[in-house]
Image: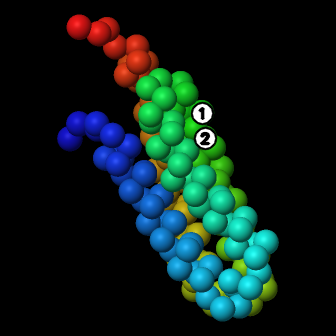
C-alpha cells in the first residue's frame, strides 16, 4: 500500500485511538475536576497526533523524523500522567495499565518508523524531481 497522506499511516491511526482512550478517561467526574492534569494529558495526547501529521506534511524525512521524536516523547509524557491519575485515585489499576501498554506499543511503532526513515535513501517528497 502506498502512503499518500498522514491518514494512511498506522502510527497516526494508533495515535488517534490513544487520543480517544485518553479523552474518555479524562471525562470521568473526579478526573475531569483536576483541570491541570486533564489539560496536560490532553495536550500531550494532541501532541502525538499532530506531530505525526505535521511531520509527514513537511515533505522531508529529516524533518519528519524530528517530529516523530516529539510524538514519541509525548507518549512517555502520557504514560507518566496516567500514573499520576492512578495515584490520585482517578483510575482503577487496570485502566492505566491498558492505556500505558497501548502508549508503549505506539511509542515502539513510532521508534520503528524513525529507524526506517533514518535508514531510507529517500529524502522525502520535496526532494523528488518535478516533471
Residue 42, quarter of picture: bottom right
The x and y percentages for residue 17 are 44, 66
Asked whether the beta carbons under mark 1 and mark 2 sit within 8 Å of each other, the answer is yes
**Residue 58 can be seen, yes or no:** yes
Badge 2 marks a residue whose secondary structure is: helix
The residue carrying pointer 2 sits among few (fewer than 14), some (14 to 19) or many (20 or more) residues within 10 Å by Cα, namely some
The x and y percentages for residue 71 are 58, 48
| Residue matched to label 2 | 69
Image quarter where the N terminus lies is: top left
Relative to 10, residue 62 above or below:
above
Q: Is residue 81 left or right of residue 64?
A: right
The residue carrying pointer 1 sits among few (fewer than 14), some (14 to 19) or many (20 or more) residues within 10 Å by Cα, namely some
Q: Is residue 86 left or right of residue 17?
A: right
Residue 127 — which label?
A: none
Instruction: Report how many numbered discs are placed on residues in the image.
Output: 2
Image quarter where the C terminus lies is: top left
Q: Residue at x 47, y 43 (%)?
A: 53
Residue 93, quarter of picture: bottom right
Q: Residue at x 56, y 72 (%)?
A: 22
| Residue matched to label 1 | 66
The color scheme shown is: rainbow
Q: Residue at x 60, y 52 (%)?
A: 47
Q: Residue at x 53, y 49 (%)?
A: 50
Residue 37, quarter of picture: bottom right
Distance from Cα at disc 1 to Cα at disc 2: 5 Å
Relative to 129, residue 36 above or below:
below
**Residue 108 can be seen, yes or no:** no
The x and y percentages for residue 106 are 49, 57
Badge 1 marks a residue whose secondary structure is: helix
Relative to 64, residue 40 above or below:
below
The x and y percentages for residue 55 are 51, 36
Amino acid at each position: 500500500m502506498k502512503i499518500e497522506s498522514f491518514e494512511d499511516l498506522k502510527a497516526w491511526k494508533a495515535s488517534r485511538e490513544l487520543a480517544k482512550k485518553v479523552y474518555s478517561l479524562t471525562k470521568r467526574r473526579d478526573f475531569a475536576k483536576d483541570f491541570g492534569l486533564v489539560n496536560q494529558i490532553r495536550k500531550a495526547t494532541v501532541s502525538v497526533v499532530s506531530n505525526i501529521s505535521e511531520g509527514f506534511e513537511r515533505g522531508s524525512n529529516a524533518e519528519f523524523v524530528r517530529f516523530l521524536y516529539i510524538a514519541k516523547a509525548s507518549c512517555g509524557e502520557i504514560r507518566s500522567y496516567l500514573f499520576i491519575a492512578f495515584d490520585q485515585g482517578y483510575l482503577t489499576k487496570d485502566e492505566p495499565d491498558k492505556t500505558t501498554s497501548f502508549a508503549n506499543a505506539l511509542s515502539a511503532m513510532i521508534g520503528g518508523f524513525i529507524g526506517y526513515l533514518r535508514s531510507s535513501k529517500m529524502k522525502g517528497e520535496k526532494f523528488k524531481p518535478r516533471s
